[in-house]
Image (cartoon, grey):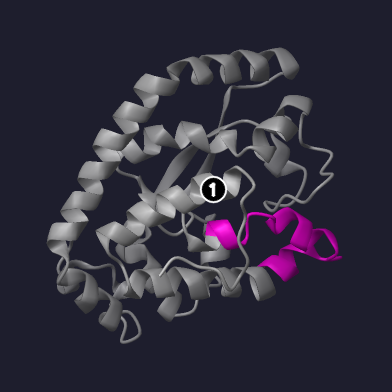
């Protein structure tokens, strides 16, 4: 995993609010190396076992609606760098041009196959590609689009010390985020002013308490959440 010295960090991250998180992680370089090793080995093993699922999803998506198999949206990851995430497409082509970047239940842009894929979070499977490339990790803050990053507080910038993740405590707690936003009239405002700050509280707590073992526990907890075992906002991995 790429690790920069404090002076090498982007100017927007060399902040007093970020320094405690940086110093804490700097003492765990061995665990960070183990984290990257797990990302590489884990993504290769999972792909070897589920390559057939990639093929099935790709065929189903192409037969269901016009457009590409993957949805490639710009997101932000470690050190504030942008990348184009790999997600199996669950909405109509060019959906981000005809609506919000936040999806709610009953969103007309979601395709028939996409509704099933989203229910079981199968759209995240393709992020194995991002994990292998190093633009993402199995565990870490979910990557946001640049316009939401623009609303980050100085302390929130600490989440960019590590690569964005496929899952996190916040992902488990807010796995029903679409339902939460359904009751809001202004979905974008509700996400930026209410949901995002609450998610970032979990992300910052995870950053401060990072350990390799905690990452492994979160991966298992995510499987449980997808299988319907669930969690609440007060039930987080410590």
Mark 1 burial class by Cα count in 10 Å: few <14, some 14-19, many 20+: some
**Hey, which quadrant is residue 174 in on the image?**
bottom right
- Return the x and y of residue 164 as percentages of the image width and height: 40, 54
**Hey, which quadrant is residue 160 in on the image?**
bottom left
**Does 65 sit above or below residue 162?**
above
**Does 74 sit above or below residue 21?**
above
**Hey, which quadrant is residue 193 in on the image?**
bottom right
**51, 75: nearer the viewer:** 51
Region rendered in magenta? 171-191
Q: Residue furthest front?
A: 229
Q: Secondary structure at mark 1?
A: helix
**Does 192 sit above or below residue 52?**
below
- Return the x and y of residue 32 as percentages of the image width and height: 20, 57
Dominant secondary structure (helix, strand or loop) of the stretch shown in magenta: helix
**Is residue 22 found left or right of 193 in the rendered image?**
left
- Return the x and y of residue 33 as percentages of the image width and height: 16, 52
Q: Residue furthest bottom?
A: 16
Residue at left offset 20%, top offset 43% = 37
**Is residue 156 found left or right of 101 in the rendered image?**
left
Which quadrant of the rendered structure holds the C terminus?
bottom left
- In magenta segment, residue 181: yes
Residue, disc 1 = 224
Residue at left offset 25%, top offset 43% = 38
Q: Is residue 33 visible?
A: yes
Q: Is residue 2 visible?
A: no
**Does 107 sit above or below residue 57?**
below
Residue at left offset 56%, top offset 57% = 172
């Amino acid at each position: 995993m790429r690790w920069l010295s404090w002076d090498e960090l982007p100017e927007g991250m060399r902040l007093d609010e970020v320094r405690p998180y940086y110093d804490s992680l700097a003492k765990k370089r061995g665990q960070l190396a183990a984290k990257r090793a797990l990302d590489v080995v884990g993504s290769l093993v999972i792909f070897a076992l589920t390559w057939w699922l990639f093929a099935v999803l790709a065929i189903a998506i192409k037969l269901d609606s016009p457009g590409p198999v993957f949805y490639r949206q710009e997101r932000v990851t470690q050190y504030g760098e942008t990348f184009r995430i790999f997600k199996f497409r669950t909405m109509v082509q060019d959906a981000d041009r005809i609506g919000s970047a936040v999806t709610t239940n009953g969103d007309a842009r979601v395709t028939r196959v996409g509704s099933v894929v989203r229910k079981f979070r199968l759209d995240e499977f393709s992020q194995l590609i991002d994990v292998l490339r190093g633009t993402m990790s199995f565990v870490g803050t979910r990557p946001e689009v640049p316009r939401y990053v623009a609303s980050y507080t100085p302390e929130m910038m600490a989440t960019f010390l590590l690569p964005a993740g496929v899952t996190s405590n916040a992902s488990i707690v807010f796995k029903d985020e679409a339902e939460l936003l359904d009751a809001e009239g202004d979905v974008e405002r509700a996400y930026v002013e209410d949901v995002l700050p609450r998610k970032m509280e979990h992300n910052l707590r995870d950053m401060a308490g990072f350990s390799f073992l905690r990452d492994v526990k979160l991966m298992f907890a995510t499987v449980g959440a997808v299988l319907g075992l669930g969690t609440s906002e007060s039930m987080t991995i410590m």
